[in-house]
């Protein structure tokens, strides 16, 4: 099998940022993908995204998944989502590697039987066409019989503005620009056609403001969606200055490190330090404290060290 090299893209970064900063946005996506009926009040517990995949010769290779988490509903379920800007031949191999390692991370051995639970897996495709399948499949042929499972596919380009807001799929908004990608040259040369694109983003902006006024989303969530929309726009339309400026003018300027995000970040850091202080006063060993804050605040091993 060919060597598989994993590179992060700006779109992966946007996807992870949305999940980390506005994790509630993932629940409507899960409802849509897996036909669930989560209310939105369920707790989401993220797992560390870094996984060490066992290689031949005993070496371990670190890979980063886009999102692995549990939703604690009536029956807790484990999910694994990946964001794909386009399909590639290595994607199914990566899914199998990730899903297997995720299952092994919490495998149990009882009476000489190893039990592993695979996550419910899905891919968000930012680009798709008529040939793009609605689901992918992994089939394992084992001495004990054949086992197969589906990896569901969400195609962001299929969703209109109305459907996004009707189904509360706000996580898709930053990627909405992909549905216009093939027309960038037209927008760049034709002011009237650019105006049509801008009008769509006026709708998005106004609908977000309506949700804010209704109390359905916070100012922080609204700002994050706008911020991430701008980040996607900067990369996908890097060769089309008129398109970038036209959409950004409607959606709002660059809001990186906006006040709400700074406040939230400071609050999280204060919470981590407070947790460490309490556990130390209780005599909890340093190693145990590190594991605790990694799990509670979704930190990598390296990031957790600065608080000890």
Image (cartoon, helix red, strand yellow):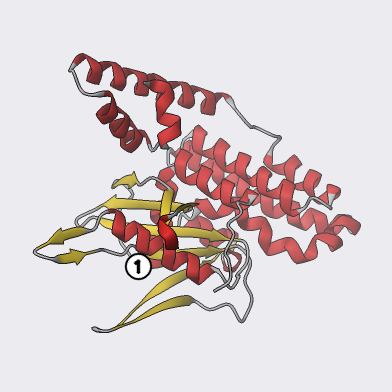
Name the residue at 60% across, 70% down.
87
What kind of element bears circle 1? loop
| Displayed quadrant of residue 34 | bottom left
Residue at the limit of the structure toward the left, as seen here: 111
Asked if 12 appears above or below 21 in the picture, the reply is below
Name the residue at 48% across, 26% down.
265
x and y percentages locating residue 261 in the rendered image: 53, 28
Pick the quarter of the image with the C terminus: top left
Pick the quarter of the image with the N terminus: bottom right
x and y percentages locating residue 230 in the rendered image: 68, 43
Towards the viewer: 292 or 173: 292
Towards the viewer: 161 or 74: 74
* Numbered disc total: 1
x and y percentages locating residue 227 in the rendered image: 62, 39
Asked if 44 appears above or below 78 in the picture, the reply is above
- Residue position for label 1: 35
Q: Residues within 10 Å of mark 1 (few under 14, many from 20)?
A: few
Asked if 114 appears above or below 301 in the picture, the reply is below
Name the residue at 24% across, 53% down.
73
Towards the viewer: 13 or 232: 13
- With 27 as the anchor, is 72 left or right in this view? left
Any part of residue 55 in sight: no
x and y percentages locating residue 241 in the rendered image: 84, 47
Any part of residue 84 in sight: yes
Residue at the limit of the structure toward the front, as seen here: 57
| Displayed quadrant of residue 273 | top left
């Amino acid at each position: 099998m060919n060597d598989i090299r994993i590179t992060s893209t700006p779109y992966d970064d946007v996807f992870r940022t949305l999940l980390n900063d506005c994790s509630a946005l993932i629940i409507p996506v899960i409802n849509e993908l897996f036909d669930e009926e989560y209310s939105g009040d369920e707790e989401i517990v993220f797992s560390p995204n870094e996984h060490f995949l066992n290689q031949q010769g005993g070496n371990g290779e670190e890979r980063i998944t886009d999102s692995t988490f549990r939703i604690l509903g009536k029956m807790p379920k484990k999910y694994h989502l990946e964001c794909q800007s386009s399909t590639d031949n290595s994607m199914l191999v990566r899914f199998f590697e990730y899903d297997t390692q995720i299952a092994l991370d919490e495998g149990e051995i009882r009476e000489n039987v190893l039990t592993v639970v695979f996550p419910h897996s899905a891919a968000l495709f930012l680009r798709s066409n008529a040939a793009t399948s609605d689901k992918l499949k992994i089939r394992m042929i084992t001495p004990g019989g054949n086992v197969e499972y589906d990896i569901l596919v969400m195609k962001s380009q299929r969703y209109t503005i109305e459907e996004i807001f009707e189904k509360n799929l706000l996580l898709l908004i930053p990627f909405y620009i992909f549905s216009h990608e093939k027309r960038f040259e037209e927008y760049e040369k034709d002011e009237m056609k650019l105006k049509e694109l801008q009008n769509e983003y006026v709708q998005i902006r106004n609908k977000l403001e309506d949700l804010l006024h209704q109390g359905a989303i916070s100012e922080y969530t609204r700002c994050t969606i706008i911020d991430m929309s701008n980040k996607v726009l900067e990369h996908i339309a890097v060769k089309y200055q008129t398109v970038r400026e036209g959409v950004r003018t409607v959606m709002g300027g660059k809001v990186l490190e906006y006040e709400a995000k700074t406040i939230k970040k400071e609050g999280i850091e204060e919470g981590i330090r407070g947790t460490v202080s309490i556990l130390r006063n209780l005599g909890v060993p340093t190693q145990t404290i590190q594991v605790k804050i990694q799990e509670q605040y979704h930190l990598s091993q390296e990031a957790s060290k600065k608080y000890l």
